[in-house]
Image (tube, helix red, strand yellow):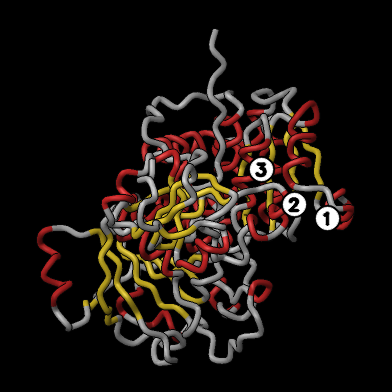
Amino acid sequence: MATPEKRDLVSIDDLTCEEILELFRHADEFREDLRAWSNLCRGSIMATLFFEPSTRTRLSFESAMLRLGGGVISAADSASTSRAKGESLADTVRVVGGSYADLLVVRHPEDGAARVAARFASVPVVNGGDGAHEHPTQTLCDLYTLWKEKGRLEGLEVVLCGDLRHSRTVHSFAYALARFRANIVTMAYPGFEMPPYVVERLKREFHVQATPASVGDLPGIVGSGNSAAYLTASKPHQLALFTNITPVHLEHIDAIYMTRAQRERHRGESTEGYPRLSGASLRSEMLKDARVMHPLPRTDEISYELDSDPRAVYFRQAELGVPMRMALLAFLLGKIRLHSPPTGFRTVQPGLSFARGLRCRNDRCVVNGEGARYLVGDFRLVQESPPVLACAYCGSEATAALIGSAHTKVYHRYNSAEARRIKPENRVYFESEEQARTAEFRPRGDGEPESE
């Protein structure tokens, strides 16, 4: 009997929309009586490897596993692990994912670290948050909360507010909302806008279009220098919006997703005037049925007076994290089955790997951090002409101006006939001639043989 393929949850893309909705229904079953499932995962062990602080994510995972009847081993302080001695993440997960545990939950400060863990571990890996990259299980909890509150996801108007550049929860949530054809309003604190690679991917893969937005009077958010943008899945009757300079005017909002300033990933930027939701913010008619969401922890961006407002659901988000994670763990451990076919789930496999050539420009990426010792550049070609490549670890994108041949060490303009003749397996991509020459490639001279 063939061994089932290992499934990881590194990105929210690793689950199809149909699988996500099935997991919601399983979470509903678990939530009916959290104590009724203590035999489902008996004998299984989960390891939580947290190299960055956490309260809710780690404890909700551990609670979920214990309620399923499994065991938990934990490394909750990186200072007390062998990382303090210089051990690589790859070696750690190979050891812990051997006879120690049947599933790993990993949190790490570097973007793309969860992808490294998934590649080197022999057991399923769940991303508990990797740098400013993604936090897919938080997204499952967020989607589950929104689904239960509103009864649907498609067509909802959701505001993402605050630090959209560094918040990994926002990035995963935006991808998922786009897949479910919800509409997104971004209201970033100035300078903390959504990363360009996130916006480009939303446009390229999910056909999301962007246009200015007008959201009326929202005290504490609008009027503090925060500009709004409307991101929506393009439909024929909407296309006229994108050629009109007039901003899209929203008359209602279904949810506001607030985020704190991610100070642990800032570089000394001021956050004076950071948006803050208060009772006055919610008096707007467009927010009468909105839900206020937050991945927690909060600092000053949501007033405590809102805690008693029935529209505030951030503590319910945290509560729903346990049954949601119970469903996920039971699925990844093979204890429950999903009937939706996994066809098309987008787990990133090794793509274009080369020790020389294009480099990930994200200095927070694991390949430029602890992985510099043992990882080489690994990219996915996401656009042919001009060549756009995405780092297989953190997703950051770069455009290549030149293509070289690993066989001849000669480079050409990406759109030249010579470049097109280079076999895909021999191609090495460069952003500039300087980068190519540093890698000891040279331009084609007269009389040289054509590249292969």
Q: Which residue is mark 2?
A: 50
Secondary structure under tag 3 reads helix
Give the quarter of the image for residue 146. Answer: bottom left
Marks 2/1 in contact by CB < 8 Å: the verdict is yes
Q: Please say if 101 is above or below 250.
A: above
Give the quarter of the image for residue 77. Answer: bottom right
Query: Which residue is rendered at x = 61% and y = 42% of the image?
Result: 126
Q: Is residue 125 visible?
A: yes
Q: Is residue 11 left or right of residue 304?
A: left
Q: Amino acid at mark 1?
A: Asp
Viewer-nearest residue: 440 or 391:
440
Viewer-nearest residue: 428 or 50:
428
Q: Please say if 272 is above or below 311.
A: below
Query: Which residue is rendered at x = 47% and y = 46% of the image?
Result: 408
Q: Which mark is residue 77?
A: 1
Query: Which residue is rendered at x = 42% and y = 56% of the image?
Result: 411
Percent across and percent down for residue 343 are 37, 30
Tell me the distance, in whole angstroms, between the alpha carbons under discs 2 and 1: 7 Å
Secondary structure under tag 2 reads strand
Q: Which residue is mark 3?
A: 117
